[in-house]
């Protein structure tokens, strides 16, 4: 059978769409079962949904710079490129900015809290800064038509992922953790696939990739996709797009997060690795005790 690009295959399964999901349902039906879900109502009252446009970022933050593939672009330049982007000549990507570092005031535009906030340990004042250091919690993505995330990957540190489409639309291509044998993880970076183009893969070099089962889902403004740790994914923008991405940490991925954090400390500051791990285990136990009494 000839390979059909997931970009052109309209028979691929999508992702379940839900409204009014409770924290308990999120945990039991999606996190514990490693299932993604698209929530259609969780950000409807966010100021960001009316406020965040390409013109807004160009006018207010236009001088801020970001490097993509060795070249630096201001936000004003990126907005111009994304508004005139084509499939043949897409705007630079990934153009992703750390919200906490670049414009922390935008956090106020992402309220009221969503279903994720109540279960996210990264947001808790109990979370030690030592453990969270280096973890990107909130990201903003600016892309244009044809902008494609260049690496099929799994997100780092065993973190769950939430991405909200604020402006325009974006297509997600996701592969469940059980598809890992077909992903050709790179030996040096196992969270990255060696398959460099899922739309035109080199099947002579990566023949097993033809067996991989893809989920294809388009997010429109107001949609939020959640997928648990371990899901392979990449994206393509069919039009100018602004997305907000957030890392999520709860009891289900706490030990994996600690394991990855410990490895990082061993490499960067080995003297602090054991204390950081001990603090992590103590903090995790405290979180678990408190969460037993959460409604």
Image (cartoon, helix red, strand yellow):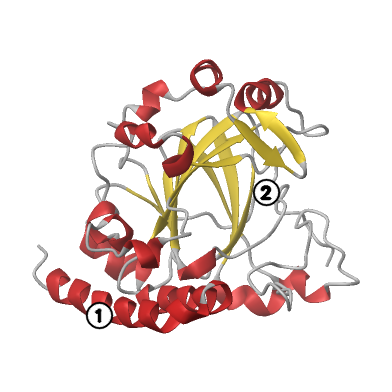
Where is residue 182 shown, x and y percent of the image?
A: 71, 75
Q: Quadrant of residue 254?
A: bottom left
- Residue placed most toward the observer, 52 or 77: 77
Specify whether 180 is left or right of 157: right
* Residue named by callout 2: 149
Query: Any mark on residue 128, and which?
Result: none
- Residue placed most toward the observer, 132 or 292: 132
* Residue named by callout 1: 282
Where is residue 175 shown, x and y percent of the image?
A: 59, 65
Secondary-structure class at tag 1: helix
Specify whether 119 is left or right of 211: left
Identify which residue is drawn at 53% across, 33% down. 242
Q: Quadrant of residue 184?
A: bottom right
Secondary-structure class at tag 2: loop
Report crowding for label 2: few under 14, some 14 to 19, many 20 or more residues within 10 A (C-alpha): some
N-terminal of the two: label 1 or label 2?
A: 2
Q: Is residue 104 above or below residue 15?
A: above
- Residue 274 visible in the snapshot: yes
- Residue 36 visible in the snapshot: no
- Residue placed most toward the observer, 127 or 162: 127
């Amino acid at each position: 059978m000839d390979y059909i690009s997931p970009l052109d295959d309209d028979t691929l399964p999508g992702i379940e769409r839900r409204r009014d999901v409770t924290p308990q349902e999120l945990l039991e039906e999606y996190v514990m079962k490693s299932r993604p879900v698209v929530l259609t109502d969780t950000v409807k009252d966010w100021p960001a949904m009316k406020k965040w446009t390409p013109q807004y970022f160009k006018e207010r933050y236009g001088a801020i710079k970001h490097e993509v593939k060795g070249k630096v672009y201001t936000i004003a330049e990126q907005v111009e490129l994304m508004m005139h982007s084509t499939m043949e000549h897409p705007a630079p990507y990934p153009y992703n900015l750390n919200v906490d570092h670049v414009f922390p005031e935008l956090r106020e535009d992402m309220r009221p809290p969503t279903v994720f906030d109540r279960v996210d340990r990264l947001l808790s004042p109990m979370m030690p800064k030592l453990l969270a250091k280096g973890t990107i919690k909130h990201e903003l993505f600016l892309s244009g038509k044809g902008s494609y995330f260049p690496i099929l990957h799994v997100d780092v540190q065993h973190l769950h992922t939430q991405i909200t489409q604020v402006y325009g639309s974006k297509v997600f291509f996701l592969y469940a953790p059980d598809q890992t044998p077909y992903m050709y993880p790179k030996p040096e970076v196992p969270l990255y696939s060696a398959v460099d183009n899922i739309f035109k893969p080199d099947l002579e070099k990566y023949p097993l990739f033809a067996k991989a089962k893809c989920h294809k889902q388009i997010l429109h403004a107001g949609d939020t996709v959640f997928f648990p740790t371990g899901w392979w994914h990449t994206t393509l923008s069919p039009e100018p797009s602004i997305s907000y991405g957030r890392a999520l940490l709860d009891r289900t991925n706490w030990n994996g997060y600690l394991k990855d954090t410990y490895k990082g400390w061993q490499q960067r500051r080995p003297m602090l690795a054991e204390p950081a791990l001990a603090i992590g285990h103590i903090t995790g136990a405290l979180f678990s005790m408190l969460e037993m009494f959460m409604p």
